[in-house]
Amino acid sequence: MSELILEQASDDFLAREADVYPSRNGQSARLIGRQDPVVHASKEQSPPVDCSFIDAYNEQGFVVLNDVFTPDEVSTFQRELDRLRADPKTQQSADVITEPNSNDLRSLFRVHENSPNFKALAADERLADLARYLLDDEVYIHQSRLNYKPGFRGKEFYWHSDFETWHMEDGMPRMRALSMSITLTENFDCNGPLMLIPGSHKQYVVCEGETPKDHYLTSLKKQEYGVPSDDCLKTLVAQGGIVSAAGKPGSVIVFDCNLMHGSNGNITPFPRSNAFFVYNALSNKVVNPFCAQTPRPEHVCTRKNIIPIPKLKRRI
Ligand code: 6CS
Ligand code: FE
């Protein structure tokens, strides 16, 4: 028995040693090249959106699709967002993250399972077909959340690559995942919209420090590990600049799992609320974390309940 444990430990050690995307392991901060495609579909496959969007996604690491959802659909999601916030069950739930210095709701996780509306949204063909094309595989939801970014006290999300965290803390093997952020309120320049660094997805940022135990309990409020060094960030911004994704409700920001992004706090009275789905390729299911900690819980990282999204020709 103890031999088996030793063997597993040494396998894990070897896997981490051979890791093409090392981070938080004592190495100094630096940029290394991406080892995976951005668009996984072959040239022969035809995309569900105009080819120019696919080319932009490939080059920039993101694309904004405007007016994907109608005002009526957006109103339905907004009502569901408010209903969930007011529901006493939500307030008791482990799926909730509050803002660092107040009890305001910052994020609500696992909405693709716990809300029929958001479950339908995650499976909607306008989103899922594009995810299947870009990842060239069946897809499942690795993580879902509503980010409320409330007015007055909504705090920032510091710069990060999602993949760095999902690789280190969840054991996502390769860069074959993407995020879709569906805007549910207007994203102005002033209420803390998503900021993206074009082209940054082509390099992987090795981060300093070690992963603390139960990191998710603090990182989801304020992330301090798995963030780029000042020098790495300077280089990425010098190369690509910064774009902020302002837009009307009902648009979709599609971005690669390794794109460097973040957002400022919101001291305006206007909430900046988004629904956020992470699609992962079925062939890229999570394994053991690449950092030396236990896996994060199911509401932050789907590990047990992996269900491919059905290919239905159906809109919500
Ligand atoms: O922890 C996560 O899965 C996501 N949340 C944060 C604050 N950073 C990394 C990743 O985007
Ligand atoms: Fe993120």
Image (cartoon, helix red, strand yellow):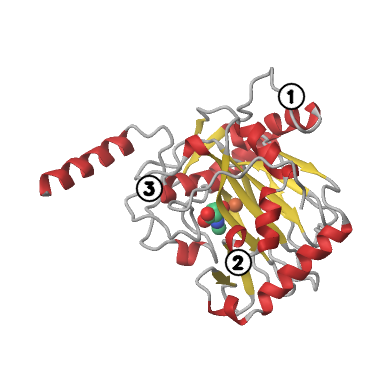
Q: Earlier in the sequence, mark 1 or mark 3?
A: 1
Identify the residue position indicated by label 3 in the image.
289
Identify residue for label 1: 46
Could you say which disc has been placed on residue 108 in the image? 2
**Upstream in sequence: badge 2 or badge 3:** 2
Q: Amino acid at mark 3?
A: Pro
Residue 27 locus on image (x, y percent): 37, 41
Q: Secondary structure at mark 3?
A: loop
Q: Secondary structure at mark 1?
A: loop
At label 1, counting other C-alpha atoms closer than 10 Å, the crowd grade (few under 14, some 14-19, many 20 or more) is few
* Camera sees residue 197: no
Which percent across, then down, holds residue 132? 64, 35
Depicted 39 relative to depicted 43: above or below: below
Q: Would residue 65 be seen by someone viewing this image from the given angle?
A: yes
Q: Determine whether 299 is above or below 58 in the image.
A: below
Q: Position of residue 26 (x, y in %)?
A: 34, 45
35 lies above or below 275? above
Q: CA distance from mark 2 to mark 3?
A: 23 Å
Q: Residues within 10 Å of mark 3 (few under 14, many from 20)?
A: many
Residue 116 screen position, x and y as percent: 66, 62
Q: Amino acid at mark 2?
A: Leu
Q: Determine the CA span between mark 1 and mark 3.
A: 35 Å
Task: Please tell me which residue is depicted at 61% across the width and 66% down the height of the picture.
Answer: 107
In the displayed image of the protein, which residue is found farthest to the right?
A: 71
- How far, Cα to Cα, is label 2 from label 1? 35 Å
What residue lies at 33% left-to-right and 32% top-to-bottom? Answer: 18
